[in-house]
């Protein structure tokens, strides 16, 4: 009997223990084991209180949300998981993106390849003034005003400074070394490089040049003064004192005032820039000895039968010779004595402003044109104070302060050519025979 009672007590105790366990609340560790990450329903556990779906969802989070976060785009579409980048990589990526989007140094716009006047009207005006021009126009093309190219003012002026008072070969070499300072990928030798004339070429911007120190500029072969001149020019284009727009909108007088303020640029350079880069119609480079000499021959041949025009043998444009080659022989000269000895063709051959297009000398057949009887019948008298004897003496070497003609004499002689003196002046270089008397 006792054994039966003991067995009953043991069974009751076991039953009570099991019931006690069933009534105990579910612990947090137990919920982790029994929960299913892929469901949003509350986990039902014996003896636990029923929870709402919202509370269960907030307390039971999928483990995967701790490993990757999905960025929500503005438009609500699903985006790829974010990938963390190192700080340095992120900054580099942002910098590269900004560099591609916004140029740090905007390029100054080029001047359009158009004329501000009618070349046909200009020719007709000059023919009315002096009928010999008609034959001149048929013999020789006015290249700067007929073969138009877009020009960058900063580049043209830099090249003018680089080419001052040195041979065109030396100027070409220095110019190439100057460009290579900013684009080392170019060939070392200028002869191995075909330069691009477009704005997208390798020529540096004014902002790039302004940031360079004088020592580095001089390493391209520039003298200290030329390096200073180019740096001054670059600074003026960088800060807005000079610009393509200002240059294009300026009058001849305003242009001279702006450019002469730049170190290394004088009146003669302004005149060449205005004629060959800006293609302005009424420029008179009064200080150019080549133009002066050509004008002496032009007017003497009309007013003096005893002074026929002749060319020295080495100046004759021989058959089969290219006009570009013969153009290298021309010697219209610079105002300074040093440059006059070298000749303007050497100093300017390198320039992209097309000063290399200074016309070749005429052949001896020009003698007939210059001494035209038709022109002599309708010729206007020489200006007051200018005589045939004076012109002869000047051409024979009796100069006035180193010049064949004074600025006022040139103004008086070309007064009828206005407002198209640039066109007439262009052809005077073809009469500038340095060895003739």
Image: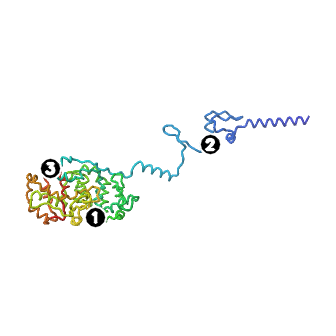
Q: Residue at x 26, y 47 (%)?
A: 114
Q: Nearer the viewer, mark 1 or mark 3?
A: 3
Q: Answer with mark 1 or mark 2, whichever residue precedes in sequence.
A: 2
Q: Secondary structure at mark 3?
A: helix
Examine the image and state in which quarter residue 413 appears. Answer: bottom left
Residue sitting nearer the eye, 143 or 288 = 143
Per the image, the residue denoted by label 1 is 167
Residue sitting nearer the eye, 421 or 314 = 314
Whole-number angstrom distance, CA of label 3 to CA of label 2: 95 Å
Q: Nearer the viewer, mark 1 or mark 2?
A: 1
Q: Answer with mark 3 or mark 2, whichever residue precedes in sequence.
A: 2
Looking at the image, residue 422 sits to the left or right of residue 240; the answer is: left
Q: Answer with mark 1 or mark 3, whichever residue precedes in sequence.
A: 3
Per the image, the residue denoted by label 3 is 127
Per the image, the residue denoted by label 2 is 63
The location of residue 266, given as percent across then percent down, is 23, 60
Whole-number angstrom distance, CA of label 1 to CA of label 2: 80 Å
Whole-number angstrom distance, CA of label 1 to CA of label 3: 36 Å
The location of residue 130, given as percent across then percent down, is 13, 52
């Amino acid at each position: 009997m006792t054994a039966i009672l003991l067995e009953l007590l043991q069974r009751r105790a076991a039953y009570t223990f099991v019931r006690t366990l069933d009534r105990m609340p579910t612990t947090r560790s137990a919920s982790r084991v029994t929960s299913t990450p892929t469901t949003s329903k509350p986990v039902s556990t014996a003896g636990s209180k029923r929870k709402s779906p919202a509370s269960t969802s907030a307390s039971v989070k999928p483990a995967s949300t701790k490993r990757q976060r999905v960025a929500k785009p503005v438009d609500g579409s699903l985006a790829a998981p974010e990938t963390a980048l190192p700080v340095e990589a992120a900054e580099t990526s942002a910098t590269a993106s900004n560099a591609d989007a916004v140029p740090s140094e905007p390029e100054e716009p080029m001047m359009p390849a158009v004329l501000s006047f009618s070349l046909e009207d200009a020719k007709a005006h000059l023919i009315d003034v002096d009928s010999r021009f008609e034959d001149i126009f048929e013999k020789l093309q006015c290249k700067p005003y007929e073969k138009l190219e877009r020009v960058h003012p900063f580049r043209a002026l830099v090249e003018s400074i680089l080419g001052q008072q040195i041979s065109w070969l030396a100027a070409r070499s220095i110019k190439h070394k100057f460009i290579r300072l900013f684009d080392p990928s170019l060939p070392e030798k200028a002869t191995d490089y075909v330069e691009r004339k477009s704005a997208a070429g390798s020529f540096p911007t004014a902002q790039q040049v302004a940031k360079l120190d004088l020592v580095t500029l001089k390493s391209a072969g520039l003298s200290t003064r030329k390096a200073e001149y180019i740096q001054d020019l670059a600074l003026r284009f960088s800060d807005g004192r000079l610009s393509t727009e200002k240059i294009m909108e300026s009058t001849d007088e305003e242009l001279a005032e702006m450019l002469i303020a730049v170190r290394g640029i004088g009146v003669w350079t302004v005149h060449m820039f205005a004629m060959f880069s800006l293609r302005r119609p009424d420029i008179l480079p009064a200080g150019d000895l080549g133009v002066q000499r050509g004008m002496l021959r032009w007017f003497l041949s009309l007013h003096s039968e005893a002074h026929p025009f002749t060319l020295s043998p080495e100046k004759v444009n021989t058959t089969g010779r290219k006009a570009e080659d013969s153009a290298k022989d021309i010697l219209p000269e610079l105002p300074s004595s040093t440059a006059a000895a070298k000749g303007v063709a050497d100093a300017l051959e390198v320039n992209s402003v097309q000063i290399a297009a200074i016309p070749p000398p005429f052949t001896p057949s020009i003698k007939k044109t210059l001494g035209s009887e038709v022109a002599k019948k309708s010729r206007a008298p020489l200006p007051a104070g200018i005589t045939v004897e004076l012109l002869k003496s000047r051409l024979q070497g009796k100069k006035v302060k180193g010049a064949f003609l004074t600025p006022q004499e040139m103004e008086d002689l070309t007064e009828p050519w206005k407002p198209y003196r640039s066109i007439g002046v262009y052809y005077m270089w073809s009469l500038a025979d340095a060895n003739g008397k």
